[in-house]
Image: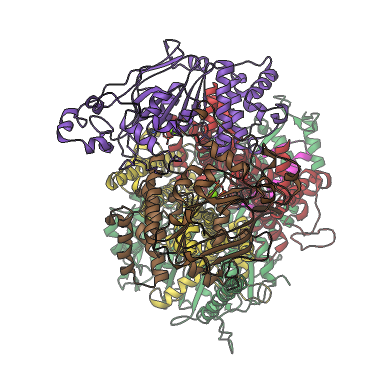
Amino acid sequence: GRAFADGSTAGSGSGAGKTLRVAMDGSGVDTLNPFTAYFNGALDLFGGIYPTLTTIDDAGKSAPYLAKSWKLSDDHLTWTFQIADGLKWSDGQPLTAEDAAWTLNLIMTDDVAGTANGTLVANFESVTAPDATTLVVKTKQPQSNLDYISIPVSGIPIVPKHVWEAHTKDLKDFKNESTPVVGYGPWVLTEFKTGEYAKLDANKTFLLGAPKYDHLIEQIYKETDAAVAALKAGQLDYIEGVNATQFKTLQGASGVQTAQAVGNGWFGLELNAGAKTRTGKPIGTGNPALADPVLRKAIALAVDKKTLVAKVLDGQGQVAEGYLPPAWPQWSWKPADDQLSKFDPAAANKLLDDAGYKAGSDGVRVDPKTSKPLNLRLGIHSDDTQDAAVSNYLVSWFKAIGINATIQPMSMSALNSDLGKGNWDMLMDAWTTGPDPTYLLGIQSCGTLPNDDGSGGNTDSFFCDADYDKLFAQQSTIFDPAERAKVVGQMQEILYQGNSNIMFYNSTHKIAANAKVSGLLTGTKDANGFYPAQSSFWSYLKAAPAAEAAGSSGKDGGSGAGLWIGVIVAVVVVGGGGVLVLRRRSGADDRE
Amino acid sequence: MSSPRYLVTKLAAAAVSFAVTLVIGFVLFNLMPADPVRTMTRGRPTSEAELGRLRVQLGLDKPLWERFLDFVNDTLHGRLGYSWQYQQSVASLTMHRLGPTLLLMGTAFAISVALGLWLGVRSGWRAGSLFDRITSATALTLWSVPTFWLGMILLIVFSVGIGPIHGFLPAGGMSDPTLPQTGIEHYADVAKHLVLPALTMVLVVYAQYVTIMRASIIEEIGSPYLLTARAKGLTDAVVRRRHAVPNALLPSVTMIFLHLGGLISGAVAVEAIFSWPGLGELTYEALKIPDLPLLQGTFIVFSASVIIMNLLADLAYRALDPRVRAS
Amino acid sequence: MSADPTGTGPMSTEPMSAQPTSAGPTSAQPPDAGPNSAGTAPPLLEVRDLHVTYRSGDRTVPAVRGVGFTLAAGDTLGVAGESGCGKSTMALSLMRLHGGRAEVTGEVLFKGENLLTTGWSRLRAVRWAGASVVFQGAMSALNPVRTVADQIAEPIVLHDKVSTKAAEKRVAQLLDSVGIPAQRMRAHPHEFSGGQRQRVMIAMALACRPDLIIADEPTTALDVMVQAQILELLGDLVKDAGIAVMMITHDLSLLAHTCDRLAVMYAGRIVELGPSRQVLEDPRHPYTTALSRAFPTIGDPASRRAPQGLAGDPPRPSDVSDDGCAFAPRCARVHDGCRTEKMLLWPAGPDRESACLLARPERGGGAL
Amino acid sequence: MSGLRRFLKEFRRRPSGVAGVSILAAFVALALLAPLFVGEDQLDVTKVDGPLLAPPSGSYPLGTDQAGRSILALLAYGARESLRIGIIATVLTVVFGSLVGIVAGHFGGWTGRILMHVTDWFIALPSLPLAISLAAVLGQGETSITIAIAVTSWTATARLVRAQTLAVEARPFVERARVLGAGNRQIMVRQVLPNVMPLILVSSTLTVAGSLLSEATLTFLGLGNPTDITWGEMLHEAFANGAFTANAWWYILPPGLTILAVVLGFTLTGRAVEHVLDPRMEKSR
Amino acid sequence: MTLEVRDLSVVYPPRGGVGPARAVDGVDLRIGDGEIVALIGESGCGKSTLARTLVGLVKPSRGQVLYQGTPLDYSAKALKAYRRHTQLVLQDPGGALNPKQNVFDAVAEGPRLHGLKDDLKETVHDALTRAGLRPPEDFYHRYPHELSGGQQQRVVIAGALALNPSLIVADEPVASLDASVRGEILKLLLRLRDDLGLSALVVSHDLGLAWNIADRVAVMYLGRIVEQGTVEEVLLNPRHPYTKALLSVVPSGAEDWRPTLLSGEPPDPTAIPAGCRFHPRCGRWAGASAADRERAACDRRELPVLAADVSGAACHLLDLDPPATDVSNAWENA
Ligand SMILES: Nc1ncnc2c1ncn2[C@@H]1O[C@H](COP(=O)(O)OP(=O)(O)OP(=O)(O)O)[C@@H](O)[C@H]1O
Ligand SMILES: Nc1ncnc2c1ncn2[C@@H]1O[C@H](COP(=O)(O)OP(=O)(O)OP(=O)(O)O)[C@@H](O)[C@H]1O
Ligand SMILES: [Mg+2]
Ligand SMILES: [Mg+2]
């Protein structure tokens, strides 16, 4: 067997009640200030301790949270949310629509408060709370995704006005670390240690149902392996986001349950088809050959996505074609069979041959326009193991069609810097998205190109297409989901055919938990055995301790202490003894 | 040279070293073009205007020399710059992490020094004996082990468990959050978390001290004053303890302090592996982005600590060695 | 206690007793030299057929190759010979101070007790209390990090079993006696000049009132003037206390003045032994002749613009063999027998011995 | 030359040194011969067809990695890169360190003092954080790692060489050379250099050992080029890809043990050389 | 006349908080053609410093070194040229040879540095032969550690001879050698003088050495020459109390030998006493009557620098005495 340990797990009991111990997202918590925090670890925590207007259900649709229901005016500009009545913040103060209105207004008006979520409210005209249970949001333009802007984890958290009012001046430096943090949610943050852990208590009167555990601990493990080790050793109950190898091993481990959810992100390759500014001025050092759609098509044909899924992901993912990930089936799009770029190096070679890319003596094709060999840089994130693994395949595949790719590992910071300046040929990239695709679609629009002086710009691959932009503007004003999905589909088709963003795969989201934690997973498996995407918000809320096992092993931290002390003593004794024996043997001190 | 003057000279030298460190630090970390703002906001809906605002906030729009002045001013005010990823002053970040790092390094240092010096004296005194050969071979081998690798192996063996060994030590962190965070139990718990990272560091570091001390003792062994001591009729142990060790200790102490940088280096890898919430891990975190101001900050803190330790070593050496004291 | 109390033995390699019986040297001794001078009690120190061989790696270096002599209480013996001839090696082996680096055979009878075979704890008791050592370089022979008082008091506390306080009182007296103010006892060795350090060394050697002081080149590192001072001091102190001294140096002319008797060593052996003035003025060994001529007499026209030397190089200890005279290759009067015959210390006149064939009695010794 | 022969004779007497040299010879041979028995195809992820992360078996004596490549092949190939980085870093270090050391030692005045202050500053800098920072700043990959190691490790050599230079310069033969008419350069090259050479030699073997460890650590911390094949990178990959969880000891142990062996080899050799060249031993002969 | 120094002073800058050391403090000295001058004095009196100044290794703080009447030029080029004529032989032959150079290279070093590569083999052969290492070929490939001390010193001398110097400054050339070897080296120096007409300054603390080989002798105390003259004059009829004390501690065969010990520690060039620099240790001064003390005023009155080439002693007390009678007769019967 490959498993390290017996896999027996401990009851997580400690203190009063049951504790759910989860591994915090590896990024950790940058700050507990929800207005400025970016790290996923922090966002996960906010999901548990600050309320949002809405939440999302199993199917990724918006569902009631603070808002029991919501209405859209006929002119599509005014949203009225009916806020639940009688809620109280963790310090006993009433939670009303006024808190929500105050929070949203602060983000709209204060630069610092808008640091993290300003974009989400950019289209807001006004937010008011006419009474304690009514919240009215007026937008400048019709905006179809308003019921997604304040959802747990990825949306705007609502904060208690009576606490935060005092901090609007020093919002930038306010760390919000005095516990218990006043909030409302399934949990109350009672203790926080930077870089170590967060301790939370269950809110037994939570609106959407009380958590089954009494306590939640989010602990940081910088290396997933360490977390997995802790899980196997029974020191941890739940890990999100293990990698393929870990997952495969854990699948066989006793006492551990595993699950894969369909991915909420894509992994692929971006091609620099001609970086330019908003006014169309070319910038950067990208290889001009990539402006040729034929070359890009050939590159797309040269990649064997199935092999990548099989070998890099060890089968734990799906081949990706469309831009938006399968976690949000409402937006999914697939190319028609005749459009599909299947792995076909022969076809790619033929395309290139026909387009006049002649192979040089070293097998590298020459760009007919510039007469330069096709030497392309392949930028990868140096800290991303998938990038590294996939790039090895790509280089080899590209070689097979006469393209010489050189891998350039770059730090995230350097890569982003180069990206914005257009100083690249090919980049490995990956994005994830929540249920609302607006932002992800937006970074492919012409509006995100940089200014002529190189400033500004938020583009991802310098993709710019007029038709696409038109559709992009259109989709955000369509309020019928099916209708909107169709437009989004058309946009994805344009992206697909542009071959500036070649999607490789959607890797699954992998979860491992102690077998004694039940109720974690909702939804039903799809044909591949994948579950629908779930947010940590629900996972922690729904997780339930299994019934106390008879005669539990009792191998928990407390009694383990004796053992480890024993072993250390033993080591010292053995080591010291050895030394003493050696000393004895070396003779008495009656010599020199 | 008189004592106060000596102190002043040494302090001045340390101050100059520190200033140089600051400059080296700044130059290093501002050489590279970086777009921290896009990095910070990556994967989140962020508008262009917001990106611009962040750039101004981080002072990235200023020319280099202005940034240098800001940096000096910042450092003099004890802020050490502003972290891109944590969006707070590097000083406050490092302050949090200093405690754990000191705990880990202090423990590892104390144990390594005690163990290393003891073994070094023993094996140097009887160079070539079985004890010496075993000690030296072990030390050399352990010195050759990559720290992080040893850490990983120890992690597997003692935390995960392998074969018949059950993992019984925590896999990471500094304390078990399920336990109360005060009182004896807490200290025991921290100690328990400390075992693996400290052990890893000790195993790699003590070897150096063994070698240093062994060499110093061997250096002293031929000394005529030891012959004198023997001729006085002192027993071997007394000769060693009262005459050889105090003399051998002096060069060793300097060497040990000089090797302090090595200890810090070990700490980075070890903290990364054991999720020990210290400066090393912070460095490791900063490395991923890389968060240059934070790297710069940890770098300066590390350098400053080495400078301070070397200063202390100088003073200690002076206090210990009458010869140096006089000159 | 295995020694034959008469000091003579059956072994042929053993030197004749050099116990002074004649009037000359003994008269130089102070009258209170002790009962041993009568010649019947065991001598203070008797060395028989001492061999010392260094082992380094697979090489062995026979540094001392059969040395024997006796030393009575209150007697002073000078040992001369050029560098590397084994003087220090011989001296250190008396107290078994070589540790494991050298193999020592023979007998060293100190008050009748063989120090080479006695137990370590016995030996330690003899060290310093019975015989102390003054080493060449006082800077390195004193522990640089401990105070002078500490180091002098150390053997007093150890051997005399007195309190540290009492020991310190004695330290003050000792320092006083060598002309160093007692207030300076808290100073470290480096705070003293070379001459003062050597005085400290002497004070230390006297600490336990030993019967014998072995002084291994106590002044070679010092300036001529200081050298003379130290020798005066040492001479006075031991004379007053009736302590026997073995003084080692390669400067023959120095020894002539300070010591009653003189042993000249060459290549690990004593080649001439006798009252110092006689040895110097009327050498019975060609090597001694050459050595004494190397120190010119100022005013002596014979040596004006005529330096005297000894051609050739001293042998390497590892190269000398037991057969023949080690000095033969450099000897002006060498003949066939010198290369083959075994060299022993033959009597060469009253109270004198020489290891030269020419000095052998049957050849009419002393005809050099 | 008698000196060399004597050196070899002395060296051969030290079993640990011989063991060190043997280890090194074995690894150098492995590195040099690697291309003969490790084809490109065995390293090309698209061409290999081994099972993913499989334990050792007949056709894969040390098992396979995540992409199904033979660990043995990677290990052999990694020897080339690892040794190359280590040795280049060392050459840089030693050349620079020796130069600074000799010049600082020879010119007592301002030049020497400034050089020594600079050296001291660098000594005060903790090397790994500095190397990390340098590598982070210079960008990913072996070049920056090599430079980072060289920049941070020359100080030890410089210090040693300077001390030795001072010692050598204090010896009368330097004065004699001066009286014979030698200038600064001639003294440094003809008198000092031959006498500090043994030290440089020793220092360089020990520096290689240190460089290899630094390389592995820096790579492990993610500053290497993840698509290179070095031992450090193998460990990085193993660690990043969860080989620990998979208990893939065949992926974790061999690179670590080879690093250990080579570092030990260099260390043993260096110490043996040091011992043989110890001036004190020379004198006693 | 070969080499002359005038009013030479060398001051070492303060070190470690101790004031400047006036190692040489006003010296006039002349070494004539084919003359051997012995410079004698206690440890630390500045002998080596003076010797090193003569060969241009130390730049004087004041005064001049004149070679053939022209002052030394301290430019690198001029020094190099000067050093073809003047060579230094150091005390410790083991240390003076580069352990990494064999005998041939060590001797050839000088000619090589001066670009005299034409008949290098011959030069080296010659020099070694003259230094008494015969046959030279046997020594070519030996390294210093394979030679005895006497042989090493001969190699050093050969190295100096290879440049055909006209003056050799020998700083304690035999101090580290055995008594038996010492005489051989001194013989060699004498022979070289006789055969090649070399001049030499021999530095030593050993009066016997002066007696053995020197023509003239200069006695140095604390940076000054306190007495000089021909060997016979100075050694047999010493006038300066310091010279007398020095002579007295040389062990002699005399039965009643009793050295005149100077009290106090060796003198310190960082704190040179006022007046006669010897007065704090001077037995005669200490024992002089109050009137004499008043007259001589050794503790206040500075002494003039003793002129080169003139026999004499720098001592105020000499003025009190009638010219000294011949005291050498005590030795006559030895
Ligand atoms: N530890 C040792 N190992 C090997 N040989 C040694 C050792 N110590 C001394 N010798 C050799 O033994 C011989 C005698 O040495 P020793 O020190 O007794 O001479 P010495 O007469 O005291 O000389 P010096 O006058 O120089 O002090 C020398 O040739 C020396 O090289
Ligand atoms: N480089 C230097 N810097 C400072 N002081 C020095 C230096 N060299 C020598 N001195 C001092 O100058 C004085 C004279 O030194 P010098 O070496 O000339 O004496 P010496 O007569 O040759 O003595 P010795 O007989 O011990 O060789 C000494 O007190 C010495 O301490
Ligand atoms: Mg000796
Ligand atoms: Mg001198």
> In this view of the protein, can residue D56 be seen by the observer?
yes
Chain E rendering hue = purple
Magenta-span inclusion, residue A384: yes
Q: Between residues C319 and A377, which one lies in front from this camera angle?
A: C319
Q: Between residues C164 and B143, which one lies in front from this camera angle?
A: C164
Judged left or right of residue E104, residue A475 is left
Tell me where residue B322 appears, x and y as whole percent: 37, 52
The mark tally for this picture is 0
Tell me where residue E180 appears, x and y as whole percent: 58, 37
Q: Between residues A6 and E309, which one lies in front from this camera angle?
A: E309
Q: Between residues D284 and B83, which one lies in front from this camera angle?
A: D284
Residue at the far bottom in the pictured view: A550
Q: Is residue E317 above or below residue B208?
A: above
> In this view of the protein, can residue A494 be seen by the observer?
no
Report which quarter residue A215 is drawn in.
bottom left
Q: Is residue A145 above or below residue E117?
A: below
Residue at the far top in the pictured view: E69
Looking at the rendered image, the quarter that the C terminus of chain A falls into is bottom right
Report which quarter residue B60 is drawn in.
top left
Q: Is residue B254 above or below residue A178?
A: above
Magenta-span inclusion, residue A318: no
Chain B rendering hue = yellow
Start-end of magenta stretch: A382-406
Which chain is assigned brown?
C
Judged left or right of residue B142, residue E41 is left
Which is the main secondary structure of the residues drawn in magenta? helix
Tell me where residue A161 appears, x and y as whole percent: 31, 62
Which chain is assigned red?
D
Which chain is assigned green?
A
Q: Is residue A200 above or below residue B322?
A: below
Report which quarter residue A42 is drawn in.
bottom left
